[in-house]
Image (cartoon, helix red, strand yellow):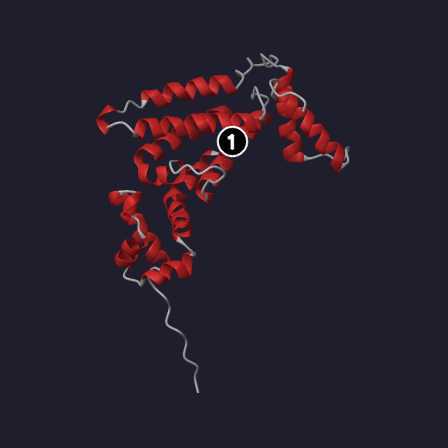
Amino acid sequence: MTRETAPEQTGPTLRQKIVLAAAELLEEAGLEAVSTRAVAARAGVPTPSIFRIFGDKDGLLEEVAEHGFGRYLAAKAELLTGDDPVRVLREVWDLHIRFGVEHPAYYTLVYGQVRPGHMPQAGRRAVADLRGALVRVAAAGRLRMSVDLATEVMHSAGVGTILALTALPEDARDLRTADTVREMVVDTLTLPPPPDGAAAPGITVASSATTLAAALGRDGTSALTPGELTLLTEWLDRLADPTTTAG
């Protein structure tokens, strides 16, 4: 007696159908249109299925954000392999701006629904990638401040720029604004490259501390105990951000 095998599944799963239905509603009419009842009707499923699979509407929106940010995050990951870390930083900025302007529904889903202490997973991944790009700048000796502060500065500037642009009528948006902000931010965060064969200009205690902190974070060291390494990292963070005072 032969054993029957289950037919190979084709097409989207129930979970995918619901996410795609919610994404369609979001793109067509904005977040206000994404009610659980409307999503269920679009997906052709009972409304309780949404709660069974995603827990609640917030759980569904988390996955819609992941769906919308997927290609953007994949493209950013490819950029991070570039040779010149400061050029990569500019490219990461440009990609971020382009994604936000071209996909405002997904962007505002992640960054426009402000809840203190909460950011969707897609947004946290984007910030982590930005931090990774800045770690490379620091490791090259070209970051003026700590990686954490630089990440906050660049992320805040990027989000603010996109939300300001997308609030304007489409024919009134001037993307030169984003280019100008990019150069202001990059100039604030980074040191210029040294001439061939010369020492890097503008080396300061802060930039040196940032470079060492990045190297320790990347490579570690066996010369210090974990407690000593933690203490050294705290000191380097203070030196990297001169405005930080000992508490």
Q: Residue furthest bottom?
A: 1
Q: Residue at x 32, y 20 (%)?
A: 176
Residue 146 relative to residue 152: left or right: right
Q: On the picture, is 227 further left or further right than 146?
A: right
Identify whether 62 is placed above or below 105. Answer: below
Three-letter code for the amino acid on which mark 1 is drawn: Ala
Q: Position of residue 49 (x, y in %)?
A: 36, 62
Q: Residue at label 1?
A: 133
Where residue 32 sits, quadrant-wise, is: top left
**With respect to residue 164, does 16 lie above or below?**
below
User: How far from the left and from the top, in percent, is residue 144?
Assistant: 57, 19
Quarter of the figure with the N terminus: bottom left
Residue drawn at x 43%, y 41% is 74
Q: Quadrant of residue 28?
A: top left
Q: Quadrant of the C terminus?
A: top right
Q: Position of residue 228 (x, y in %)?
A: 76, 32
Is residue 136 among what the camera can see?
A: no
Q: Nearer the viewer, residue 127 or 93?
A: 127
User: Residue at image x 53%, y 25%?
Assistant: 150
Q: Nearer the viewer, residue 116 or 43?
A: 116
Q: Position of residue 164 (x, y in %)?
A: 34, 26
Count of numbered circles on the image: 1
Q: Nearer the viewer, residue 156 or 7?
A: 156
Residue 41 relative to residue 239: left or right: left
Tell me if mark 1 has few (under 14), some (14-19) or many (20+) residues whose alpha carbon lies within 10 angstroms of its own.
many
Tell me, yes or no, if residue 128 can be seen here: yes
Q: Is residue 137 left or right of residue 171?
A: right
